[in-house]
Amino acid sequence: MTTATADRTAPTEHPVLDVLADRWSPRAFDATAPIDEGKLASALEAARWTPSANNTQPWRFIVARRGTALHEQIHAALMGFNQAWAGNAAVLLVAVAETADAQGTPIPHAVYDLGQAVAHLSVQAHHDGLVVHQMSGFVAEQIREFADLEERFAPTTVIALGEFGDVSALPEPLQEREVAPRVRRPLDETVLLSA
């Protein structure tokens, strides 16, 4: 199945690449489709080649395929309504920021660079026909514990990745969110200063 985005294309004020206008964050995942390992590898490769300050690459990923104990542990760490749908994703990833190097020197740009890596991963995955949904609603300490992460590694986002699924399989309030109009603040309210 390919990503159903034709009716979800962003109504941009200015032209952007199709892969950016068509990308969105669904909650409907096909609970039976396995991950295409080649597409997963390409998404992770796109993240690997993200620019970073001084080429420090302060990002790591925990990759859990559906049906594994690790997938179940990540799913259990999700909060609220994220648990109602995210378990259907073929893969749950945890995006981890390396906030200090091995000597303890802080990496102040770590979260920014991790965000870029996740953006690259998302665009590549969408380009390849997968869907991605990022979540901040999770218990980071729970993930830190089962992943045995050093203090300098901060679980920052959980990402659901897989094939687009049946919207009608979602709880009703989430079905409404899947088809609601896509909106963004106008560009002139986003740009604070321009000369």
Image (cartoon, helix red, strand yellow):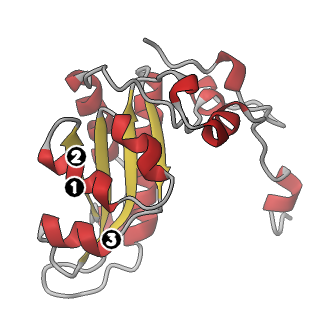
From mark 1 to mark 3, how far is it between C-alphas?
12 Å
Q: Residue at x 88, y 56 (%)?
A: 188
Measured in 3D between alpha carbons, the distance from the residue under mark 1 to the one under mark 2, in whole angstroms, is: 5 Å
Q: Of all residues shown, which one is farthest toward the top?
A: 1
Q: Earlier in the sequence, mark 3 or mark 2?
A: 2
Pinpoint residue 166: horizontal percent, then vertical percent.
51, 21
Residue placed most toward the observer, 175 or 99: 175
In the image, residue 65 lies at what x, y percent?
21, 37
Quadrant of the rendered image containing residue 4: top right
- In percent of width and height, residue 193 lies at 83, 69
> Helix, strand or loop at disc 1?
helix
Q: Which residue is mark 2?
A: 71
Image x and y of residue 111, in percent = 41, 69
- Label 1, on which residue? 73
Rendered view: 150 above or below 90: below
**Which quadrant: the N terminus?**
top left
Q: What type is the residue that disc 3 sits on?
A: Ala
The answer to whether any part of residue 51 appears in the image is no
Q: Are marks 1 and 2 in contact (CB under 8 Å)?
A: yes
Amino acid of disc 1:
Gln
Q: Residues within 10 Å of mark 2 (few under 14, many from 20)?
A: many
Q: Residue, x 66% and y 16% (percent of image)?
A: 6
Around disc 3, counting alpha carbons within 10 Å, would you say few (fewer than 14), some (14 to 19), or many (20 or more)?
some
Q: Which numbered disc covers residue 123?
A: none
Between disc 1 and disc 3, the foreground one is 1
Q: Is residue 80 left or right of residue 51?
A: right
Residue drawn at 30 percent across, 32 percent down = 90
Badge 1: residue crowd in 10 Å (few <14, some 14–19, many ≥20): some
Identify the amino acid type marked 2: His
Q: Quadrant of the C terminus?
A: bottom right
Q: Nearer the viewer, residue 8 or 170?
A: 170
Rendering quarter of residue 173: top right
